[in-house]
Amino acid sequence: MAKKSVVKSDHVTSLKGARVHLRILERADIPTTTRWMNSEYISDIMGYLPTMSLEQQYEWYDRTKNDRSRYIFAICQNKDARHIGNVAIGNVDTLHRHGMFSIFLAGTADQAKGIGSEATMLVLGFAFEKLNLNKVYLRTSPRFTQAIHMYDRLGFVREGVMREHSYANGKYEDKIMYSMLRKEYDRAVEEKRG
Ligand SMILES: CC(C)(COP(=O)(O)OP(=O)(O)OC[C@H]1O[C@@H](n2cnc3c(N)ncnc32)[C@H](O)[C@@H]1OP(=O)(O)O)[C@@H](O)C(=O)NCCC(=O)NCCS
């Protein structure tokens, strides 16, 4: 019988938004996630991690499912529970209280409709209010203009540029560093409440 495992449930089971909910990635999500991660489109976004077979992905999941330095959520539509992408806080450092954010919506048809913003705010709420982090950071490519627009609009602060930090599509490219501090998140939430 296939193992159903939901991890880290003492911290979180599900984060609910108006249009999507986030649930911790389950073992049953591995085939979908593997297909996405091994596609050229998502592979480029995630920084060309080594291609993994389904078996390797299951092995990775089983090995890391209780790892408290990484929280990977499935982004699911409220209307039909369809899993449309992943969002994560990784590299959680409990001494310095920071973590690294990443997100993708797998299909372009689901993008530019406000879902990424909603999922990002849900995860920021989790990172700051539940994990008690002080800072969430990320790095992105200048090519990902949609992501950059979203990070700017949500109040992430551009920290700087890591020059020729990665190799993609046959050339070195810069990475832009963004971050949000707990006090900036609190202020953004306060402003939204009016
Ligand atoms: C980045 C991503 C998660 C954002 O989610 P989303 O649901 O598309 O984002 P939203 O709709 O909430 O916001 C996107 C904004 O970009 C704008 N936008 C759309 N296409 C754009 C483009 N080509 N260039 C700049 N901005 C663009 C949208 O109008 C929207 O802005 P607005 O709300 O002010 O009108 C999603 O687009 C995605 O998965 N992209 C591919 C993966 C990726 O780039 N991941 C991030 C890597 S760091």
Image (cartoon, helix red, strand yellow):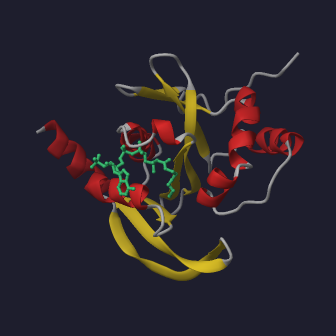
Number of marks: 0
Residue 134 seen anywhere in this rendered image of the structure: no
Position of 37 relative to 184 (above/below): above
Q: Residue at x 81, y 38 (%)?
A: 62
Q: Residue at x 41, y 61 (%)?
A: 145
Answer left or right for 163 relative to 54.
left
- Residue 164 at x, y = what percent? 57, 82
Q: Pick the quarter of the image with the C terminus.
A: top left
Residue 119 seen anywhere in this rendered image of the structure: yes
- Residue 109 at x, y = what percent? 48, 37
Answer left or right for 42 relative to 62.
left
Q: Residue at x 39, y 47 (%)?
A: 128
Q: Pick the quarter of the image with the N terminus.
A: top right
Seen as rendered, the residue at the extreme left is 194
Position of 143 relative to 81 (above/below): below
**Residue 60 picture quarter:** top right
- Residue 16 at x, y = what percent? 42, 26
Depth check, front residue: 156 or 66: 156
Depth check, front residue: 140 or 181: 140
Position of 145 relative to 165 (above/below): above
- Residue 162 at x, y = what percent? 50, 80
Position of 68 relative to 174 (above/below): above
Depth check, front residue: 5 or 47: 47
Q: Residue at x 70, y 48 (%)?
A: 37
